[in-house]
């Protein structure tokens, strides 16, 4: 009834797979687990080698990395069932009824379960920015998600009908990190396909160092600039709305000449032990401005 699709890149998924299998066997409903490794390093391949022996798991290893969009679309060729449940590899499942909740939702076309971060900050201070962003920006409550279903959609934990996903796939022009799920959400909205929101979160375990997170943020903003050139309506994206507001006020000419210096100063603060999300928002805005100017 459900094909559980887990794209893997440089993360140990053994515990996650065991949790899923235990819940799947308990449910006694038809399911399968498909893992596709997108060019992970040898150390990760060794750690994940044992999942090959699990009867309900189909494990494929790609020799080279093909990117976040292509790897997810590849599950269409390998999934058996009509319902595809995508779960990111760097997640954990804390709810003992996680899979059962999705079995209850198979009549819906698209279902998003949400994401959470652990309440306690990471001991490694270099990971503070990513954790803080997750807690304050990504962990939306269910009431907010219900009111803003497309804005809150993420690709880390969602169920989708095979027939829908065959028509509206991840855009493979986006090869690097960032906003592939934004584009999918906009396509769903454009085609008037509802995203049903439920409280069934996974916990994000793959908290990156601040420097890595900033590099991923830059990649995501570059993708956002490309996304904006698409014919889809991107007016709901806060960063784009803010940019056009300051453009309308003719403030970009004032900021742009000193933007590189400002970014250096802001980045120093974000890499500190006490990063500020307000500074992070400003950092993203100025970086977006520079990318819009093709700098």
Image (tube, rainbow, N blue to C red):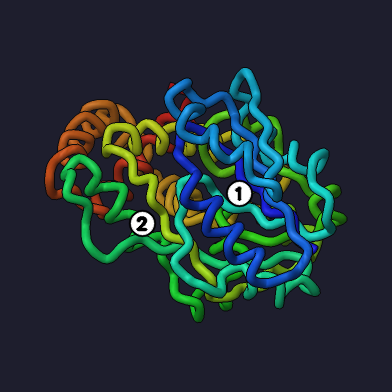
| Quadrant in the rendering for residue 66 | top right
Mark 2, residues whose alpha carbon is within 10 Å: few (<14), some, or many (≥20)?
A: some
242 vs 25: above or below: above
Q: Residue 25: give x, y in percent of width and height.
A: 66, 65
In the image, is 267 to the left or to the right of 244?
Answer: left
Residue at 65% x, 24% y is 62
Please state which of residues 65 and 182 is positioned toward the viewer in this rendering. Answer: 65
The residue to which callout 1 is attached is: 181
Choose the circle earlier in sequence order: 2 or 1.
2
**Disc sitting over residue 216 in the figure:** none
Residue at 40% x, 30% y is 290
Q: Residue 269: give x, y in percent of width and height.
A: 16, 40
The residue to which callout 2 is attached is: 134
In the image, is 113 to the left or to the right of 126?
Answer: right
CA separation in Å, label 2 and label 1: 16 Å
Q: Residue 77: give x, y in percent of width and height.
A: 82, 39
Please state which of residues 172 and 292 is positioned toward the viewer in this rendering. Answer: 172
Residue at 41% x, 63% y is 116
Residue at 58% x, 62% y is 22
Tell me the quadrant of the picture where the N terminus can be found.
Answer: bottom right
Mark 1, residues whose alpha carbon is within 10 Å: few (<14), some, or many (≥20)?
A: some
Is residue 248 visible from the viewing direction of this image?
A: no
Is residue 159 visible from the viewing direction of this image?
A: yes
In this rendering, the count of numbered labels is 2
| Quadrant in the rendering for residue 151 | bottom right
- Determine contact: label 2, label 1, CB under 8 Å: no
Q: Residue 216: give x, y in percent of width and height.
A: 42, 35
């Amino acid at each position: 009834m459900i094909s559980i699709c887990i794209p893997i890149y440089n993360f140990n998924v053994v515990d996650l797979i065991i949790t899923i299998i235990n819940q799947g066997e308990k449910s006694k409903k038809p399911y399968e687990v498909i893992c596709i490794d997108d060019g992970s390093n040898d150390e990760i391949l060794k750690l994940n080698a044992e999942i090959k022996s699990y009867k309900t798991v189909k494990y494929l290893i790609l020799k080279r990395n093909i990117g976040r969009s292509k790897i997810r679309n590849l599950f269409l060729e390998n999934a058996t069932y009509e319902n595809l449940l995508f779960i990111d590899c760097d997640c954990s499942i804390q709810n003992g009824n996680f899979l059962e909740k999705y079995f209850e939702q198979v009549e819906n076309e698209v279902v998003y379960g949400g994401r959470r971060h652990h309440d306690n900050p990471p001991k490694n201070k270099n990971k503070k920015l990513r954790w803080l962003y997750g807690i304050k920006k990504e962990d939306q409550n269910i009431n907010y998600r219900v009111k803003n279903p497309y804005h809150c959609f993420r690709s880390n934990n969602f169920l989708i009908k095979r027939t829908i996903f065959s028509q509206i796939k991840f855009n493979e022009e986006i090869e690097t990190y960032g906003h592939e799920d934004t584009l999918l959400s906009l396509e769903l909205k454009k085609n008037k396909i509802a995203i049903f929101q439920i409280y069934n979160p996974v916990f994000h375990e793959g908290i990156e160092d601040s420097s890595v997170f900033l590099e991923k943020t830059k990649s995501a903003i570059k993708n956002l600039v490309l996304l904006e050139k698409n014919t889809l309506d991107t007016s709901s994206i806060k960063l784009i709305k803010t940019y056009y507001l300051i453009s309308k006020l003719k403030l970009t000419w004032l900021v742009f000449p000193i933007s590189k210096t400002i970014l250096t100063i802001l980045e120093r603060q974000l890499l500190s032990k006490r990063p500020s999300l307000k500074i992070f928002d400003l950092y993203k805005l100025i970086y977006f401005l520079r990318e819009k100017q093709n700098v």
